[in-house]
Amino acid sequence: MNYQVIIKRIDTVNEVEGYWSDQDLIQLLDKFNYPDGATTEKKNLPELLEMAISDYEPSEAAEIVLAYKFYEELNEGQIQQIAHNMLIDKVCEEYPEIHMQGRLFHTNQLLFKAYNGKFPNAKASVVHFSMQPEQNEATKVLTKENVLKLLNNGLSDRNLIKRLFDDQMTQNIPFPEAEGIIWELNTIDNLNYTLVTSENWINNEDLISSEFESVLEEVIEEV
């Protein structure tokens, strides 16, 4: 299927608004020994949590938030190691398990704000774009995999996704890593989209064309 792709803009942000729900903030407050979060005005929860976090040593606070987000996937030793590394490097850009990078970003930025810069400042990209199929072709509900493959022609060869996943981006083979590379994909009409990802994956310097054509082929599943 042929598509006309228009990338409207790429916004660089320090945090993704709305990621942490009120319930997340209340549960985290409890883990930081502030049990009255449930009775606190919702608008005060973020500031209260930042204050509660800052009462702890940075590495200890990182362990608490990491344990909350990754309790099913990481053991205590792994959490301690990541918490230590987060004070030095942008772990959310380097961690080999791509499907965990988004949550590591949100964790990092929560700690970055609470400690006023003691943690490295990672950034995310919010890409606003449209993908219009040619006339006489039915509108398809695009997946994260579809979207990345269709964006290929507008991205520089220096782009990290293209360098690491050239075959998946250019051939009709499965691209399971797309689920972790794109953290959020939203649309109200299956034509106009926004996606959220790491600035490390897609940024303004990666863009070589804002309007281009792409072909989406049916992926041949591996046997």
Image (cartoon, rainbow, N blue to C red):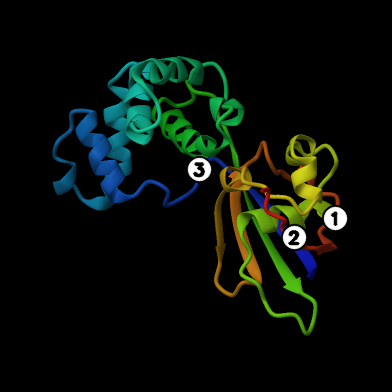
In the picture as drawn, the residue positioned furthest to the bottom comes out as 136
The single residue placed furthest to the front in the displayed view is: 223
Which residue in the structure is indicated by mark 2? 7
Quarter where residue 94 is shown: top right
Front residue of 163/13: it is 163
| Vertical side of 219 occupied by 109: above or below | above
Badge 1: residue crowd in 10 Å (few <14, some 14–19, many ≥20): some
Q: Nearer the viewer, residue 173 or 28?
A: 173
**Distance in Å between CA atoms under marks 3 and 2:** 21 Å
Pick the quarter of the image with the N terminus: bottom right
Q: Earlier in the sequence, mark 3 or mark 1?
A: 3
**Precedes in sequence: disc 1 or disc 2:** 2
**Disc marking residue 15:** 3
- Residue type, label 1: Ser
**Closer to viewer: mark 3 or mark 1:** 1
Left or right: where 127 falls relative to 34: right
Residue 32, labelled with which disc? Answer: none
Check disc 1 and report the residue beneath it: 209
Give the image location of residue 80, x and y in percent.
39, 16
Q: In the image, 57: left or right of 123?
A: left
Q: Hey, what amino acid is under mark 2? A: Ile
Which of the pair 76/205 is nearer the observer? 76
Secondary structure of residue under mark 2: strand
